[in-house]
Amino acid sequence: MESPWIFSAFLAPAGDPGTAGGTDPAGTEQLRQIRALRGRILFDGGRRPAFLEPDDQVQDLGAWHFTARRGLDGMHGPPLGYVRLLTPATSARYQSREYLGERQYAEVLAAEGLTDETVFEHSRLVVEHRARKLGLGLHLNALAIAAAHELGAAAMIGTSGTADGQDRFHGRFGFHPVPSTRRYVEKYTEDVVILLHRTVEGAGEHTTLVEGYRLLFRELMAEALAEDLAGGLTESLATRGRGLTGDPAGGLAGTGSAATPAAATPADATPAAATPADAASHSADGLSHPATSPATDADLASLGRGFSGGHAISRLWGAEEAARAVAAVAPGRTARAEAAHQHRNPHRHTPAPSGPPPRLAAIGSSDPHRWKPVLFRPARPDDRVALAALLNTGAVREVVDTVESQVEELIRSREPGRVFDAGELAAARADQLAGAQPWDYGSWAWYPWSGRLVHVLPREEYRLVRTDRNRGKIDRPEQRRLLDRRVGVIGLSVGNSAAVTLAQEGVAGAFKLADFDTLSVSNLNRLRAGLHQVGVNKAVLAARQMYEIDPYLDIEIFPAGLTEENMKEFFLGGHGPIDLLVEECDTPWVKLAAREAARDLGVPVVMDANDRGLLDIERFDHEPHRPLLHGRLGPLTAEDCHGLTPAERVQMVLDMVDADRISPALAASFPEIGRTLSSWPQLASGVALGGALVTEAARRILLGERCESGRFYVDLEVLIAPDRDCTAEMGRPGSDRTGLKRPGLDRLGLGRPGPRPAGAGPAGPGQAASLPSAP
């Protein structure tokens, strides 16, 4: 099915690129209409009064402009959305530079190991309300990012609003907020933040979509070139323009093309735009590899002659000026651009020997905000192209392909009582692949934070194999029911163990994770993480760990933690409502506010307190009027928790866990907090136990098994004690020296093997020689 969108694009004349305040040399009709469109959308019925007039910005000069219309309306329909892309040729005008000021802007680039010559700016993504629900913003954003990737950007920078979740939207494309850049801007009536995107790391969960739009961008250029060559280079711009209002005599001079998506990825429908014959090459492996290097000299020259913006430049400035402007679109990609680059940036001396090695700062760490893998299914043509493009970027540091052994495990798990010889196994493997090449089977999961590309079975088959050893305790129908559930986890310090264990055991297939905090060195005594992950948000960290267990999970994260603003979205919004809440945070307001919401919605709550194996279960799904925390805090509400002093917070925690029942070690630590202790003590063993207890309770609740409200203790101090020693029972009649009672073995149908006759072969089925050892 074809995309409902038709895209248009043009490169506006740049004016004087050497000044930040360059003027529009022609007052082009295209820009006038674009500015009116932007102003109308940004005004938003009066929400932003500053945009009552057209949105006139100097940043428009020398920028790429993209608009989209509905396919049903054709090329003469009204535009419903717009996005702008600035290139390094006009970096002095960047809106992000204006927002930060020269000094802070330079510091941001230096901290990221970037230079002006490699950074593009993405801005002014606006979409009419009626087109937002149809996903137009997603596709316009992908096209602008694809154009930057195609034109040689190393990174993209831009400002983003936050009131409507725009920053989170861009985060799905691999943009991350730059620290210390968020502040309120009166003109926009909301907080604004600087976002940064590195092209080498793909485009987040929409990498496949963006790679597909690179092909579309090339097609737009090729079509424009063909039209101009057919019509002559001196053809009047007015006679070629396709207007914003549908007037063929003026307006936006851009070549339109509709994107054609193939089968959808988990995140989006990926466009499979028709590619010009010279836009892809075929290698010996049979893959169609996109031309991942940006346009060649000939391509750029043809872009200057043929694309609408280039045509306008030629007409208004003349050939020499046009050539310079076109070459500046991708600095360093042509001899002319390289010469200009050297002229503008004379050689700079390397840092003094006393400083750190240059590459130490230039390489930097991986993006701490990347947490979701990108899945490629080579059986889909568009995914195959995108996978090849990823491999050509150099971002893949390790390829792990064990799919053939995974297929063998799948075969054996389906028939556990059968012993396959080599021939039978090969035949079963060929039958499973059904003619597909092994590399083409299943999915490839790209983990951008580690640089690993991992081959995995298709979802249902992978989960069947991965949970095979659950059977007998969790049978397959129960497993399917569990994987259809969604669990929310608040607090991913102690809660990390619970979240990861839930994912390992397959207790839920979808999760919402909320935590505002980042991993610190002092967390490494109890969180399963490494030193290289210090500074990563704890919700991001847990999501990564869970996705590395199962790349097919559905995970949403709330890196600001649970707040009044996102409470409803956490419980009800996003990909769906949660079925169970695991609450493991330290903030009193969150503890009570989350329970108040859970009780109102009938969501059961499970909590582990990490002391004496305390497990709390509150079945608000069965008891809608149950007191919070078993009534331990009396009538206290979340509202009452605002403004508590540190002493009051400690007292609340003691009341909640029952000071008379906490362990002696924890009781002794409370008076020392802030004096000799930085906080209350927690151990990895207790955290691991808590993860097990939470998972056990969650599984019972989600399967409808008996699991009542209450407070329970699985205290290892009590359980591992001399009076709990069971070895005395091993010497009773009916036992042998191994401690395994014969009636028990008989009941299991195993029996105790006697001596085997000399020369006897291995035990056959039903003649178990010993208990099997786990691999």
Image: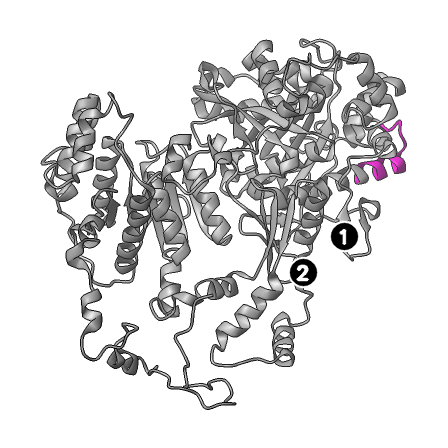
Q: Which residues are magenta?
A: 223-235
Q: Quadrant of residue 704?
A: bottom left
Q: Is residue 25 left or right of residue 354?
A: right
**At 52% from the left edge and 24% from the top edge, which residue is drawn?**
178
- 380 in magenta: no
Q: Amino acid at mark 1?
A: Ser
Nearer-the-camera pick, 237 or 180: 180
Rendered view: 104 above or below 273: above
Residue at mark 1 to residue at mark 2: CA–CA distance: 15 Å
Task: Evaluate whether residue 272 shows in this view.
Answer: no
Which quadrant holds residue 365?
Answer: top right
Residue 738 image-quadrant placement: bottom left
Q: Is residue 309 left or right of residue 390?
A: right
Task: Give the mark, 1 or 2, whose residue is nearer the N terminus.
Answer: 1
Magenta segment, prevailing SS (helix, strand or loop): helix
Q: Which residue is mark 2?
A: 439
Q: Counting other residues with Cα less than 10 Å from the Cα at mark 2, is it few (<14), some (14-19), or many (20 or more)?
A: some
233 inside magenta stretch: yes
Determine whether the residue tagged by mark 1 lies in a helix, strand or loop.
strand
Q: Amino acid type of disc 2? A: Trp
Residue 102 image position (x, y, % from top left): 60, 10
- Within-10-Å neighbours for mark 1: few <14, some 14–19, many 20+: many
Q: Position of residue 119 (x, y in %)?
A: 67, 24
Is the C-beta separation of discs 1 and 2 under 8 Å? no
27 to the left or right of 713? right
* Residue placed under numbered mark 1 in the picture: 288
Q: Is residue 302 visible?
A: yes
Q: Name the residue rendered at 34%, 46% in the picture.
A: 488
* Residue 423 position (above or below residue 739): below
Number of labels in the image equals 2
**Residue 756: percent from the left, percent from the top?**
44, 88
Vertical position of residue 345 compared to residue 217: above or below = above
